[in-house]
Every structure is written in structure tokens, then in C-alpha cells.
Amino acid sequence: MRLRSAPYTLELRHAFGIASNSRTSTPATLVALEHEGVVGYGEAAMPPYLGESQASAAAFHARAADFLATVRDPFQREEILPAIDALAPGNTAAKAAVDLALHDWIGKKLGAPWYRIWGLDPAKAPVTSYTIGIDTEPVVREKTREAAPYKIIKVKLGRDAATDRMMIDAIRAETDKPITVDANQGWRDREAALRMIEWLAGRNVEFIEQPMPKEQPDDTAWLRERSPLPLIADESVQRLPDVAKAVGVFHGINIKLMKCTGLREAERMVTLARALGLKVMLGCMTETSCAISAAAQLSPRVDWADLDGAVLIKNDCFLGATIEDGRITLPDRPGLGLLPGTGMPFSGQG
Ligand code: MG
């Protein structure tokens, strides 16, 4: 199999603020995996705070290309993807790009979308939230109005208590639709975190994502015993072995392709989380419709989805899963369901 990769910088529609930083673009790398005239596409989206870069992805994909050139049967997903994972530690987004491209190739070769290969009902794809980053009151109100087509708003909190309350009050001045909260590890004091969650529980908030730092599982478990709202692990859970550690600490987990190396492991994480009695959310980075459509294939199995990453960027270069009336809508195309769009760096390939 022939692997090509190209850097592709995602331009954000709005500067995006979370508890620890703010940014206007996200570095990404796109890949194309070709064999017997069929091309599968994949993507690595790499927010800088996670430690990967276009340079680290290029280095990893050069090694992956050497290995993939030796692959004779691309359907041997259970041989190929563990070998890719073993090439180097970390590099989870770069690995996800290869995983997505292989899934896209296999689905195209079989002539079936992955939700069908997995036996899922596309009508059960969930609604997705629309994310509002930390910003000033007028901007938050404007973004809330822009979120009109969505049934749920996800809001980033965790910078300080006054900003947290301002953000919620600004949204509530515009709409009473459900809100989910992502504190991105921003609450360090468990008593203060509990007071904030109790305040939020009276304001039609559904759950809290990663309230406290991942280094404070004991405080998070204390909070879980008392919280009136479910707590969902994000930064605390990256890969399959982390899922069991969430039991007793969180009520559920947020799975993201870019931190768990792609669809093969994400599907296992859903199964393990269910067996352990955990709720499951499917999340994303800012990503093109390539990675979003991959996550969408798995979305009929989860409780909540936060798959708005492609609508938050200006230069999406794929057509794929769409959001209709707030709900994830899967195309009837094979593989990840993609069509190349404007600016896609491997143009001219099917
Ligand atoms: Mg999160």
C-alpha cells in the first residue's frame, strides 16, 4: 500500500478559548492510502497542547509508509493497525490518520459504509452539541444565536468562577435549551467545584466534562459521590487501558479518535465502557469532515456526541457526514462516506 501525507492547517471561524489557552488555527495532516486503484483518506488533527505537530506526523508517516509498502492484504486490519501502533509510542493523532485511511480503503473496497459493516442503524446517530469557547459576554450571546440549529450547546468553562457564571448567564439570556459543560480540568478545589456544579444543576445542564485535573482522581471520585450531574472523563481517559480507571471516578467517558489512535480502538473502548456500566460520549478536535465522518460512523452506539469540529473551521476540504436539524446524518457512501472537496491536497484521486 502507498501512503502519502500532506500538512493542512485548519482555519477556525472564531478564535477558540478553553481553560488553558486560545487559538485561531489547528495544525493537521491529511493522508491518502492507495492500493489497487482505491484511495482511503485519513486525518490527524493536532491541537498544540497535545504535543504532536505536522513535523512529528511527517516523521511518523514516513515510518508508517515503509511498513505499509510491505502489506500484501489490506483487509488484515488486526495485523496492520497493531503494527502501526508499535512503530513508536505516542503519536496518537498520526496513528489515527493511518487507521482512518485504512478503514476508508476497506469500506470502499467492500462497497459499504462502516456503520453498515458494524451493523449499526444510522437513524440512531445522536444529536450533536455545538461548542462555545470562553469569550466575552457579547460574543457568547452572538455564538448562542448562531447555535440556533443545534439542540444542545456545549460550553467551555474552568478559567475562573466569575467567568464561568457570566458564560452560563450569557447563554441563558438567549436560550433555555440544554447545555453540557466542559471544564477542561479547570476546577482545582473540589468544594468549589461542587458548589459550581450545584449552581449549574439548576440551569438545565446535562453533564460536566473533566471538572478537575487528571492528576486529581481522588478529588474527582469525591466529587462524583456528591455531584447532582454526571461527570464525564476526557483528559483522564485517552486509550483502551484507561477506560477501567474511570470506574468509580467518573460516570462516563469521552472518546476521541485523535487521542485513542482511531476507529479500531474507539470501537473497543465503547464496548469496554458499556461492559463497565459507563456512559459514552464521542468527541472531536477541530477537524475536517474526514475525521468527523469517521467518528460519525460509530455514533449510533453512544449516548452523546460532540462532533461539531468541521463546522468550526473555514476550510473543510471533504464532504461527509452532515448535521441536519442538529442530528448527525450519515451519507450512504462506502468507507467513511467521504467525497473530496475544495482544497483537498490529493486531488484527482478517487
Ligand atoms: Mg473535553
Image (cartoon, rainbow, N blue to C red):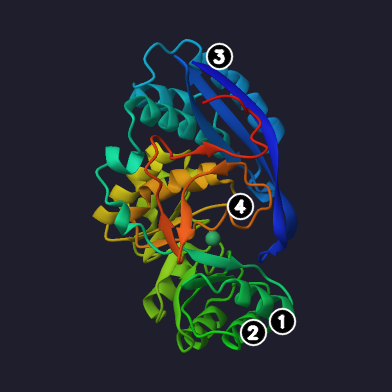
Graded by Cα atoms within 10 Å as few (under 14), some (14 to 19) or many (20 or more), the crowding at tag 1 reads some
Which residue is pictured at 41% across the width and 54% down the height?
Answer: 329
Residue placed under numbered mark 4 in the picture:
286
Q: Is mark 2 within 8 Å of ligand 1?
A: no
Q: How many marks?
A: 4
Between marks 3 and 1 in the image, the one whose residue lies nearer the viewer: 1
Tag 2 or tag 4, which sits nearer the N-term? 2
Residue placed under numbered mark 2 in the picture:
170
Three-letter amino acid code at the position of disc 4: Thr
Three-letter amino acid code at the position of disc 1: Glu
Q: Are marks 1 and 2 in contact (CB under 8 Å)?
A: yes
Mark identifier at residue 137:
1
Q: CA distance from mark 2 to mark 3?
A: 52 Å
Ligand 1 sits in which quadrant? bottom right
Graded by Cα atoms within 10 Å as few (under 14), some (14 to 19) or many (20 or more), the crowding at tag 2 reads some
Residue placed under numbered mark 3 in the picture:
66
Mark identifier at residue 298:
none
Which residue is pictured at 75% across the width and 55% down the height?
Answer: 24
Q: Is residue 91 visible?
A: no
Residue nearest the viewer, comparing 217 with 154: 154
Between marks 4 and 3 in the image, the one whose residue lies nearer the viewer: 4
Q: Is residue 243 visible?
A: yes
Tag 2 or tag 1, which sits nearer the N-term? 1
Instruction: Find residue 196 and report its horizontal and vertical position in percent.
Output: 54, 83
Q: Is mark 3 within 8 Å of ligand 1?
A: no
Instruction: Find residue 25 and report its horizontal and vertical position in percent.
Output: 73, 51
